[in-house]
Amino acid sequence: MSTDENDVIVDPFCGTGAALIAAHSLNRRWFGCDISPHAILTTAEELKKLSNVLPTQYNIVDQADMEQCACVSLMSYKKLYLGFADSKARELIHGGESGWCEFKAVLRGRPEANDGYDLQHSCLKTVAAFLNSDGGTLLIGVHDDKTVLGVRVEEFGGRDSFERHFWGLLHEALGKTASNDIKTYFEEICNKPIYVVECGRSEVPVYLKYKRRSDKGKEEEFYVRTGPRTESLSISEAIQYIIKHFDIAKQDFQRATL
């Protein structure tokens, strides 16, 4: 009653895990302890009965493991602490949008929405900007205000069809080589599928070629992240950025563009 969603609930005498299960059902993160190994095993069995809890979402550690991790540094302890019944997507949502995280409510517009192609372009330019900067994660199915909407995969014919559609967009708009620095997967948050797009830092510049309804043809664009924003650079700005960011000698860049 005194907590909000995404808060952390601590039960130092978790017993059969009733408080932890209640916390998980109410979209709270949790952390449980018990001196009895039997109690921990019982809690694990009860967690298995919940359809929205996967064994990969939490860890079971003993006192020695906890003390070994906690004494290294506060950051190490924090990482372990949030590792219980948590997920990367949930933690990113809790932290909000930043230079390394962006939320998109949908990938493709519905009839009542605005230009669906522009919505796809918005997702693609974010991916390109992460690749051209220092990497980051795009969460599709999350509103800017952190509301979890979920991806309506049924509109694409299921999860597999959604992934094929998304990767088709990536290959067409960014090129197949750019996909080497991208990893995608679904995560369940509040029983809703969130599509996670993890982008590393590309070793070469990534250009976005995408035709929107308002365009006469495909235009080549160059995007980067500036704080929590995705920005398009002009030709002169892009040249200076590429030379500096990708550590390309000016003469090499000039030869490559001839």
Image: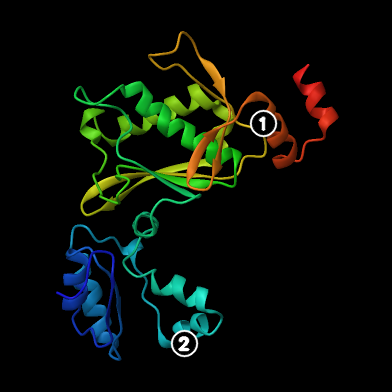
Disc 2 secondary structure class: helix
As shown in the figure, which amino acid type bears the numbered disc 2? Ala
Spot occupied by residue 227 in the image (x, y as percentages of width and height): 52, 48
The quarter of the picture where residue 56 lies is bottom left
Q: Mark 2 against mark 1, which lies toward the viewer?
A: 1
**Picture mark count:** 2
Quarter of the image containing the C terminus? top right
30 in relation to 155, above or below: below
Say which residue appears at 46% left-offset and 47% top-offset.
137
Q: Is residue 135 left or right of residue 114?
A: right
As shown in the figure, which amino acid type bears the numbered disc 1? Glu
Disc 1 secondary structure class: helix
Q: Is residue 88 left or right of residue 154?
A: right
Q: 75 or 60, which is in the foreground? A: 75
Q: Which residue is mark 1?
A: 237
Q: 242 or 186, which is in the foreground? A: 242
Residue placed farthest to the top in the image? 216
Spot occupied by residue 242 in the image (x, y as percentages of width and height): 70, 34
Quarter of the image containing the N terminus? bottom left
Dot 1 crowding, Cα within 10 Å, few <14, some 14–19, many 20+: few
Q: 202 or 236, which is in the foreground? A: 236
Spot occupied by residue 5 in the image (x, y as percentages of width and height): 23, 64
Say which residue appears at 69% left-offset and 26% top-offset.
236
Q: Which residue is mark 2?
A: 64
86 in relation to 229, above or below: below
Say which residue appears at 39% left-offset and 30% top-offset.
166
Dot 2 crowding, Cα within 10 Å, few <14, some 14–19, many 20+: few
